Each structure stands twice: as C-alpha cells, then as structure tokens.
Image: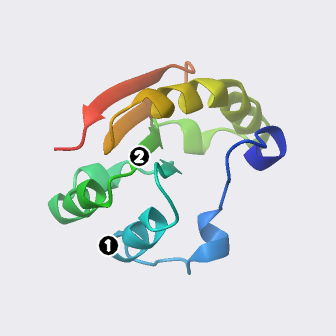
Amino acid sequence: MLGSFDRRNEMRASIDNFDKGTPDEEWLPKVSSWGDRTVVVSGDARILRNQVQRQVLKECKIAFVYLAPGWTKLPWEEYAWRIVKVWPDIVKNVEQAPYPSVFEVSLGLKVQPEGRIK
C-alpha cells in the first residue's frame, strides 16, 4: 500500500520474501543485504527484548521502526490512514539517523527516535 504513495522508496513486504515463522536471525541479515540504509517497519518490538536478536539487528546496520502497542489491534481502515499519514515523518527521521537506529511510532502518530541499537 505504501509503495503506491511513496514512489521514491522501494517497499518489500516480508510475506512476499520469507515464509511465515522464518526466524529473525535468518531474515534480518538477508534484508540488510538488499541495500544501504535499509529500513524495517514492524508491528512487533519483541526483537528488541531478545539479546540474540538485538545483536543481529545491530550487526545488520539497519533502521528498525516499530509500531507501538495498539497498532495491530486497529481496524484495517484506521491502520491504513494512520500509516499513510505518519509515513513522511518516518522517512524524514530514518533519513537523518545514524545506522543502526530504532524508532517507535505511537498511536498518536509521533515518531520517537530511541537512538542507536546498543
């Protein structure tokens, strides 16, 4: 959907590239090889709490943008307008960030940088 609105940035859906259940330690390095300044947008921030996955994320040197709790419970129509509305702010933030970095997108449509992955 975002690819229809943002023609400047390439979008790839995980469902089109990886089998469901592919371990984060497997798909993250593959995604990072797709190009410089790769960004992952996810509805699941659990990767940040797992030491092994966090280390892989750090080594991949990507920007990780996660949607705050509540996003995945929104009706599709509301989710769609919210992500389109906040997308320019996400792009601006990741373009200015050192990599690897983490950002949270709140339900209030604020992009909060959490800084470099440690």
Disc 1 residue crowd, few under 14, some 14–19, many 20+, Cα 10 Å: some
- On the image, which quarter does residue 65 sit in? top left
The percent coordinates of residue 70 (x first, y second) are 52, 36
Count how many numbered circles sit on residues in the image: 2
Question: Residue placed at 55% from the left, 18% from the top?
Answer: 108
Q: In this orientation, does residue 105 appear?
A: no
Report the side of 95 relative to 78 (left or right). left
The percent coordinates of residue 71 (x first, y second) are 56, 38
Q: In this orientation, does residue 113 appear?
A: yes
- The residue beneath circle 1 is 25
Report the side of 32 relative to 99 (left or right). right
Quadrant the C terminus occupies: top left
Q: How much space separates mark 1 and mark 2, taking CA atoms? A: 14 Å
Which amino acid type corresponds to the residue marked 1 in the rendered image?
Glu
Residue placed most toward the observer, 37 or 117: 37
Residue placed most toward the observer, 116 or 34: 34
